[in-house]
């Protein structure tokens, strides 16, 4: 085992060269979706941003990971350079659109899906919809549906204030897709609740311990991530940082994904 890990890290070091990124535009649901693809490898890392966010979430992560594998980041329809979507903005539809985009870009599985915040909802639904294509999930401070239930019951005043702030923010957004995604949020949570993850799917969860929330809500947020991690057998890593881990602590994300790549390589070599 130790010898294999040593050899793998040496291999990573020899592969660590900058990879040129290609920008491709594909048609999905009669709209244009922009994807950025770089690196090479049998396994593809797919980067999914959070609510109201585009691929810039991963600007410090994508280039580094492309030294070790093929990496895809993209703008969901309605964000960045992608065209607005006609269909409702729920996790199941967005997962379907991501899959269509990957197919039309010629990106074949297996996939490691790395997702931030609300992107974790989309990633879980994606893994449920395409179980034979996803070999691992890395969820970066993901939103979890049970958090909202517990927050309503146990920290109602703080939660109501947070909802009001979020609603004002969404309504004032200049991007119609932000408002539509917010309106579909409850449906997305329900879709995540009924999503069935593939048995034995490796999951890594990075939990922010300094998220910008009311203390009562933060305690529920972190505790729910711990509970969920245990329920699915995930590897949980606590990060002493706020919610925006991909930008503030990209090194933690990169290290976690590299460890997943090593594990997948090890499994493939022992078959």
Image (cartoon, helix red, strand yellow):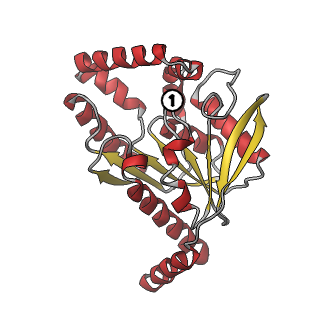
Against 45, is 173 above or below?
above
Against 5, is 107 above or below?
above
Decide if residue 225 is on the left or right side of residue 80.
left
The foreground one among 198 and 11 is: 11
Could you say which quadrant of the image residue 152 lies in?
A: top left
Decide if residue 249 is on the left or right side of residue 49.
left
The foreground one among 262 and 234 is: 262
Residue placed furthest toward the left: 215
Q: Position of residue 268 (x, y in %)?
A: 60, 72
Q: Position of residue 261 (x, y in %)?
A: 53, 65
Residue at point 51% right, 49% down? 59
Q: Which residue is mark 1?
A: 52
Could you say which quadrant of the image residue 2 lies in?
A: bottom left
The foreground one among 150 and 170 is: 170
Q: Secondary structure at mark 1?
A: loop
- Looking at the image, can residue 84 be seen? yes
Q: Position of residue 126 (x, y in %)?
A: 60, 41
Q: The N terminus lies in which quarter of the figure?
A: bottom left
Q: The C terminus lies in which quarter of the figure?
A: bottom right
The foreground one among 174 and 129 is: 174
Residue at point 63% right, 48% down? 131
């Amino acid at each position: 085992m130790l010898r294999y890990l040593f050899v793998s890290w040496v291999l990573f070091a020899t592969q660590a060269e900058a990879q040129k990124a290609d920008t491709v535009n594909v048609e999905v649901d009669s709209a244009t979706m922009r994807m950025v693809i770089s690196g090479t490898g049998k396994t593809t890392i797919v980067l999914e941003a959070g609510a109201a966010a585009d691929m810039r979430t991963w600007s410090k992560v994508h280039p580094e990971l492309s030294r070790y594998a093929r990496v895809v980041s993209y703008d969901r329809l309605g964000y960045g350079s992608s065209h607005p979507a006609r269909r409702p903005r729920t996790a199941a539809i967005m997962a379907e659109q991501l899959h269509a985009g990957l197919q039309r870009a010629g990106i074949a599985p297996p996939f490691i899906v790395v997702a931030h915040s609300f992107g974790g909802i989309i990633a879980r639904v994606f893994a449920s919809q395409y179980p034979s294509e996803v070999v691992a999930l890395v969820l970066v401070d993901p939103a979890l549906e049970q958090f909202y239930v517990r927050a309503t019951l146990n920290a109602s005043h703080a939660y109501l204030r947070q909802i009001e702030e979020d609603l004002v923010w969404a309504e004032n957004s200049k991007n119609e897709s932000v408002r539509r995604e917010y309106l579909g949020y409850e449906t997305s949570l329900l879709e995540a609740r009924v999503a069935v993850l593939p048995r034995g799917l490796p999951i890594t969860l990075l939990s922010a311990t300094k998220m910008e929330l009311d203390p009562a809500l933060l305690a529920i947020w972190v505790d729910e991530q711990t509970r969920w991690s245990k329920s699915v057998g995930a590897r949980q890593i606590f990060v002493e940082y706020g919610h925006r881990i991909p930008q503030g602590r990209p090194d933690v994300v990169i290290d976690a994904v590299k460890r997943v790549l090593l594990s997948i390589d090890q499994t493939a070599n022992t078959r």
